[in-house]
Each structure stands twice: as structure tokens, then as C-alpha cells.
Amino acid sequence: MSVRTLPWRVETRTKASTLFAAFAALAIVAGLAAPFFVPRAALQDLFFILTMLVMAQSWNLLAGYAGLVSVGQQAFVGLGAYAMFAGVILLGLDPLAGILLGGIAAALLAVPTGYFVFRLNGAYFAIGTWVTAEIVRLLLAQWKALGGGTGMSLPTDATRGMLGVGLVRDLFGFRAAQAVDVVCYWLALALAVATIALAYRLLRSRHGLALAAVRDNQDAARAVGVDARRLKVVVYLGTALITGLAGGLVYVQTARISPDAAFSVTDWTAYVIFIVVIGGIGTIEGPIVGVIVFFILQNLLADFGSVYLLVLGAVGIAVMLIAPRGLWGLFADRTGIQLLPVRRNLRGGTIAN
């Protein structure tokens, strides 16, 4: 019997992840082609799913990996939307540039607010983020140039003149309003793919390993040289930027804004938390599963009024009791399948022939 020694190596890829990568590529191609095959109402549904997925992935990165449970993400959605409106109406920017301005404004807001909320821990951090969001909402509600407390609408010429809309209209024969929906949908698809790709790349890097160490045991991570505070600040700023971009994009598509809608804790934080919790917090696949379940429940229960929220709450509680790691966590534990694996496996060593 001979003994052979193989070099040790760290692997994260699995057979399932390789197959999923091919499936994901096909899904992206199908997503790009969707405007040519699905009705406008279905395209708007897909836009909703993609933008909620972006916000869910951002919150999941913040809470599931950095351990920062925020209930004030609506601050970045609302500010991103209002910055986009200000850029278009007051500065004469193209709405696409306004979306970028919204993301930058949200990231800039995260700097002073982060200085405040990072002095808090646990439930106090969560309450601090919510209070910050309320302060921003009250301040922007006084901005008379953008409608004050009642809000305002984007000029039709601004949205229909957005970069790319005329090209889509002329090349593919869409009506002007439909062309706006197509461009917004493609932007949402690009933002969703970029968010997932960036999160996956981060979590597979050494910074991701450090982030997981901070989440699991911050004191132990600091003992081995991990700068926990710096990592959390970077994640907080990054998720603010992404959430601000999503907020700006949502309100380009809706073309109507008001403080209560833009800073709705239910629409932009409670629903996002629900998506992440039922899908599986601390996994990239979880928010994907969660947003699909949320969309199905929303459509099934849309005609039941307040019962809709009661059912969502009951479903959330049931999932947390039966599957504390969410639906995807339960599936992964039972099957061992990881479509977007970030766990590191050590391979190699001595084998006998």
C-alpha cells in the first residue's frame, strides 16, 4: 500500500454551485429578454421583486453578517428618493443621474448617523436607526420645493426623456410609458445582480471571513487582529449606498413621492426584515427565497385588507419557530445543498492507494 500526500487547499465551490452558476446565467439572459415576452403588469411585478431583493440582500448583509439589526433602512430609501427628485426638479439632472445622486446622498447620510448609532448596541442600535429615520422624514417633510408634507410628482417629460428611454422606444417600438418601465426594470435587474455578486465576492474574501468572525464572536475576532468597528462601518456605508440607489430607482418608476410613503417603516423595513427572516438570515440564497414567498403571499392576500398583515405575522412566527434559520436554512440543513456557498472547506492531506 502506497501513501500519497496531497497539498492542502481551501475550497468553497460545490457541484451544486457550479450548476447554479450556469442556471443563473440563463436566468439573467431570460430576465433581459422578459420585456419582449411578458405584459407590462408582469414587468412591474418583476421590478417590485428585484428592488425588494436588493433591499433584502442589503439588510441581510448588515444584520446577518455584520450583526447590525437596523429598523431604520427607510431613512436611506427616502433620502435616496428625495435626492433623486431634487436632482431632477431643482438641478435639471437626468433621472438616471438622479438615482446615482440618491445613492451618494444615502451614503453621506450614513456617515453622521453612523457616528451616532454606532455608540449604541443591540436593541438600542435598532431604536437609534428608527429614530434617525424619523428625524430625516420630519426634516424633508418641511422641504416646500419638493412638495412638503403632501409630496409631488416627477414631470412626465423628465421620466420619458431619461437616458435610454428614447433608444428603447425607437429600437423596439414600445410606447413611451412602457419604455420607461422597461428601462427601470433593466436597471433593477442590473442592481440586483450587482448586489448579489458584490455580497458573494465580499463573503468569499478574507474580509468576509473576518466579518463572519465578528458576527459570531466580536471579542474573539478582535483578539486575533480583526478591526470589528471598521468592518461594520464599511458594511453600514455600503448598504446605505445600495439602499439609496434602490430608493431612487423605485421612485423614478412610481414618479410620485411623499414623506409618509418614502419613509414607510412597513414598506421598506418591516417587509424587508420579513423577507430575510423567512428566507434565511445569514445566507445569500435566503432573501431570494424570501422575496418569492413574500410576493406570492402578497398577491394571494391582497384582497383581505388588514388580515394580510396578520397572516404575514403568523407566517413569520411559524417559520421562526419551525425553522429558526429560515426556509433556505432548513432546506440546506436537510440536503447539504449550497447554491452560493461561502463556507470554506479544507481539502487535501494524506490518502492511501
Image: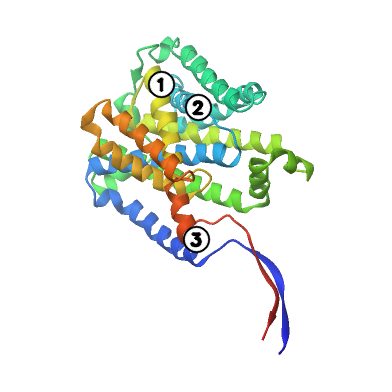
Categorize mark 2 by other alpha carbons within 10 Å: few (<14), some (14-19), many (20+): many
Residue sitting at 51 percent across and 40 percent down? Answer: 60
Task: Look at discs 2 and 3 and give the one toward the viewer.
Answer: 3
In this rendered view, identify the residue nearer to me: 87 or 301. 301
Seen in the picture, residue 87 relative to 333 is either above or below; the reply is: above
Whether residues under marks 2 and 1 lie with C-beta atoms below 8 angstroms apart, the answer is no
203 lies left or right of 173: right
Q: CA distance from mark 2 to mark 3?
A: 32 Å
Dot 2 or dot 1: first in sequence order is 2
Q: Which residue is mark 3?
A: 336
Task: Tell me the SS state at disc 1.
Answer: helix
Task: Tell me the SS state at disc 3.
Answer: loop
208 lies left or right of 132: right
Q: Residue furthest front?
A: 321
Q: CA distance from mark 2 to mark 1?
A: 30 Å
Whether residue 67 appears in this view of the structure is: yes
Q: Which residue is mark 2?
A: 71
Residue 316: % across, % down:
39, 37
In this rendered view, identify the residue nearer to me: 155 or 314. 314
Q: Residue furthest bottom?
A: 1
Dot 2 or dot 3: first in sequence order is 2
Q: Which residue is mark 1?
A: 89
Whether residues under marks 2 and 3 lie with C-beta atoms below 8 angstroms apart, the answer is no
Q: Amino acid at mark 2?
A: Val
Residue 227: % across, % down:
74, 39
Task: Tell me the SS state at disc 2.
Answer: loop
Residue sitting at 40 percent across and 44 percent down? Answer: 290
Q: CA distance from mark 3 to mark 1?
A: 52 Å
Residue 164: % across, % down:
37, 41
